[in-house]
Image (tube, helix red, strand yellow):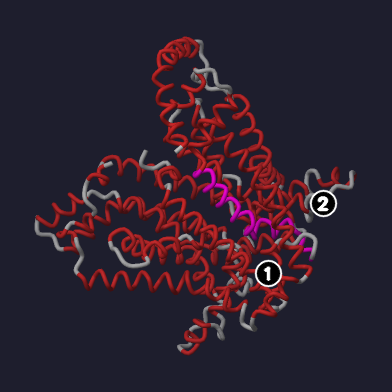
Amino acid sequence: MSGAGANVCNRVSLASALTVLQERAQRGATRENRGMHVRYSVLPGFGPTLGLTLTWLSLIVLLPLAALAIHAAGLGWSGFWHEVLTPRVLAAFRVSFTTAFAAALINLVFGLLVAWVLVRYRFPGQRLVDALVDLPFALPTAVAGIALSSLYATNGWIGAILAGWGIKVAFTPLGIVMALTFVGLPFVVRTVEPVLQDLPAEEEEAAMSLGASRWQTFSRVILPALAPALLTGFALAFARGLGEYGSVIFIAGNMPGISEIVPLLIIIKLEQFNYHGATAIGTMMLMLSFVLLLVINLLQSWMRTRHHAQ
Amino acid sequence: MLSKAAPRHAERPVLRDPLWVRWSLTALALGFLALFVLLPLLTVFAEALRQGFAPYFEALAEPDALSAIRLTLLVAAIAVPANLAFGVAAAWAITKFEFSGKSFLITLIDLPFSVSPVISGMVYVLLFGLHGWFGPWLRAHDLQVVFAVPGLVLATMFVTFPFVARELIPLMQSQGTEEEEAAASLGAGGWQIFWRVTLPNIRWGLLYGVLLCNARAMGEFGAVSVVSGHIRGQTNTMPLHVEILYNEYNFVAAFAVASLLALLALVTLAAKSVLEWRWGEDVSGRGH
């Protein structure tokens, strides 16, 4: 009730304040003409809040990342590649790339399926299922790691069944794929869901009234419209998979060259006080994440223009 | 928005998938979720209670477990309010004012999301470790950052850095600045405007961001693993304690501590869902 009252108050004061605002806005316009970058606003606090933001950002995020970059630059060009181009490091990158890619691919298919079912169908317990999709975001990675490891161990609930068929998951690269599928699932579902929700029904109806089958409508009308969102979700899941550590190390077995991921190799180098090696590999990873971030941003702006074009 | 006015797809008979398609797709999706998401969650509790309740509570009452719980709470109690204050300040500057370089600033704030947790921890080792930039100075003054609580707090702050800001920015953007401008023109000061006008409008979104920030702060593993040094009873947070117990094949104790973290995740999810269902638009900024 008090909230509603405050709202009414705000509306009233809004009307009475309009004239004042217009005067101030005019003054603001003249100030802008004097070449200020900041457009004049009647609101206080720009200086302190932006100052705090930039200081905090620099101290917590930018300075530490700069330290990594400067350390890496100190290695020199040949020193850098000397650390990166070793068989063990390259093998770790290969393992990380292939497993993250495979997991993102699984999530692309099943993430679309889950989003489709959540948006288009109604079934009992739907809200619970919807909340469950976010579990991989909320569950600490170490907890997911030991749970998956027990689940897929040869005496675990799933592992025992698979062992009967001669499939070994825990302590193999397949186990890494399972862990990365777990952590990556919400990315695809939550990226595709809102786009699927806002798809205009008219296009589908038009396709079907022109004689397209349900499958043709899906593959020719719906899927192309979802493509940017699907690719964004895929890229997000892939990027997360590349950097993931906690959920993987328990199930991976961590055999150098076979199931050793890049983040683990960085930790191993740090524990051996091999800061040069850790720096070089870490910088490679960081550059890869920045490239992926750029790709994701481009995909998202593509998604937005698509969305608005509709 | 178009879809708001138009009837839902499910309600248009032409677009309704045949019953067998609906049933089989739903079954497939639920089967996938059960296998990949629900089963790991159930495993945590099943393994924790494998030998009954007595060993479960014994494992939780163990001094090392208690000190891990205390440390986790301490780290979150510092990192979450710090990022809350930062997130509110950043959202205020970004949404209430126009300035150049704004979208670049938002990208920078989001940056920790795209950095591997291991690297988030490693950068602090390079800065404050024994061989890091400030290492010799810290050593000369008998201060320790890495392998001590300050390092854990810093690494946690790094990984949880964007949570509050990125919830608030779209929300406050969608609410505009009219109400605050009206208050300012009536003579309200900065703090008054924030407490009386802005905060009531953003409280649910703020709570949402804090919840997610807290869940990540308490559950973070990779980043703190690098800076912790794994000293039992001293620099072990709960997730790190889980790792040690698991690697010692002390499965019941490992899953007992893990079950507390899983409960935290479930409580976070439940609160998050309630916020979304009841105050959906006030939380996300969509639909304004």
Of the two numbered discs 2 and 1 in the rendering, the one whose residue sits closer to the viewer: 1
Q: How many marks?
A: 2
Magenta stretch, main secondary structure class: helix
N-terminal label among 2 and 1: 2
Q: CA distance from mark 2 to mark 1?
A: 25 Å
Q: Residue at x 77, y 63 (%)?
A: B67
**Of residues B172 and B231, the one drawn nearer to the viewer in this rendering:** B172
Left/right of residue A78 with respect to residue A297 in the rendered view: right
Left/right of residue A34 with respect to residue A189 in the rendered view: right
**Mark 2 belongs to which amino acid?**
Leu
Taking B11 as reference, is A158 above or below it?
below
Occupied quadrant, residue A83:
bottom right
Q: Position of residue B14 (x, y in %)?
A: 14, 59
Location of the N terminus of chain B by quadrant is: top left
Left/right of residue B150 with respect to residue A241 in the rendered view: right
Q: Position of residue A269 (x, y in %)?
A: 71, 61
Q: Chain of mark 1?
A: B
Residue at disc 2, secondary structure = loop
The range drawn in magenta is B204-232
Location of the C terminus of chain B by quadrant is: top left
- Inspect the magenta stretch and tell me whether residue B217 lies in it: yes
Residue A90 seen by the camera: no
| Label disc, if present, on residue B27 of the rendered structure | none
Residue designated by label 2: B130
**Mark 1 belongs to which amino acid?**
Glu
Residue at disc 1, secondary structure = helix
| Label disc, if present, on residue B243 of the rendered structure | 1
Q: Position of residue B82 (x, y in %)?
A: 66, 42
- Inspect the magenta stretch and tell me whether residue A166 lies in it: no
Q: Chain of mark 2?
A: B
Taking A278 as reference, is B242 above or below it?
below
